[in-house]
Amino acid sequence: MYNILVCDDDEAILDSIEIYCTSEGFHTIKAYNGIQAIEACKKNEIHCAVLDIMMPNMNGLTATLKMREKHNFPIILLSAKSEDTDKITGLTFGADDYVTKPFNPLELIARIKSQIRRYVNLGSMEQNDHVITTGGLSLDTAARAVTVDGEPVHLTAREYGIMEYMMRNMGRVLSTQQIYEAVWNEPSFQTEKTVTVHIRRIREKIEINPKEPTYLKVVWGIGYKIEKLP
């Protein structure tokens, strides 16, 4: 599941884009200004960003400049202005594409998919994109291996599946139902205890103090998440 950051001060536009992104299997992260978008990048792995140019507090161009200081995921700018100079400015600031409002949502989704395909399949992602790290916890999807502070962690196939799914969605709260359906690849039905037991076993293997976890956190009444740490 790819994370799409959508930033616009018009809530109706955000909701509309989210509906179409969800229909394509994308997870949408919404922000209402550039500052919120920058914060979202710190807390989530972003695979594509869609930014409106005209926003309060921090506009899309400034947000693009700041994102490019640390990130190379594709950025698509939205603007009511259609002049070539505006498009050139946006691309100069680091954007990969430019869509003029009003736009056809299906065209925007097609552009998002195209940018993600280039980013993932044609080598735009970093060389070590198969290694996911948070703090001292590291998961190598190529080797299907997990380490903590450089020491190997021996997980069962199911435990590894849970870890990979959660680390690919780092910072996102996942319900037991979501975890079960993603890892067991079947509909969930009264499966909360099954997932909880596996989570407890994983904690015992990756945490120094499982009762006060550093990485695998519970969000009471909602589910679990892997904390994103520097």
Image: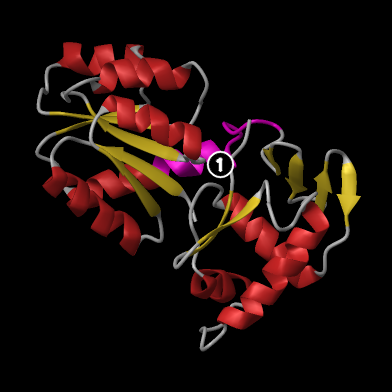
- Above or below residue 96? Residue 9 is below
Q: How many marks?
A: 1
Q: Position of residue 8 (x, y in %)?
A: 20, 36
Q: Residue at x 58, y 37 (%)?
A: 122
Q: Nearer the viewer, residue 170 or 67?
A: 170
- Circle 1: element type: helix
Q: Which residue is drawn at 26% across and 13% down?
A: 88
Q: Which residue lies furthest to the bottom in this view?
A: 189
Q: Position of residue 71 (x, y in %)?
A: 51, 25
- Above or below residue 172? Residue 47 is above
Q: Residue at x 41, y 61 (%)?
A: 25
Q: Which of 157 and 148 is in front in this view?
A: 148
- The answer to whether any part of residue 144 appears in the image is no
Q: How crowded is mark 1: few (under 14 residues within 10 Å), some or many (20 or more)?
A: some
Residue 186 found in image quarter: bottom right
On the picture, is 156 further left or further right than 56? right
Q: Position of residue 220 (x, y in %)?
A: 48, 63
Q: In which quarter of the image is the C terminus?
A: top right
Amino acid type at image mark 1: Val
| Residue 147 sits inside the magenta stretch | no
Q: Give the range drawn in magenta.
A: 114-127
- The answer to whether any part of residue 83 appears in the image is yes
Q: Name the residue under label 1.
A: 120
On the picture, is 186 further left or further right than 140? left
- Above or below residue 62? Residue 224 is below
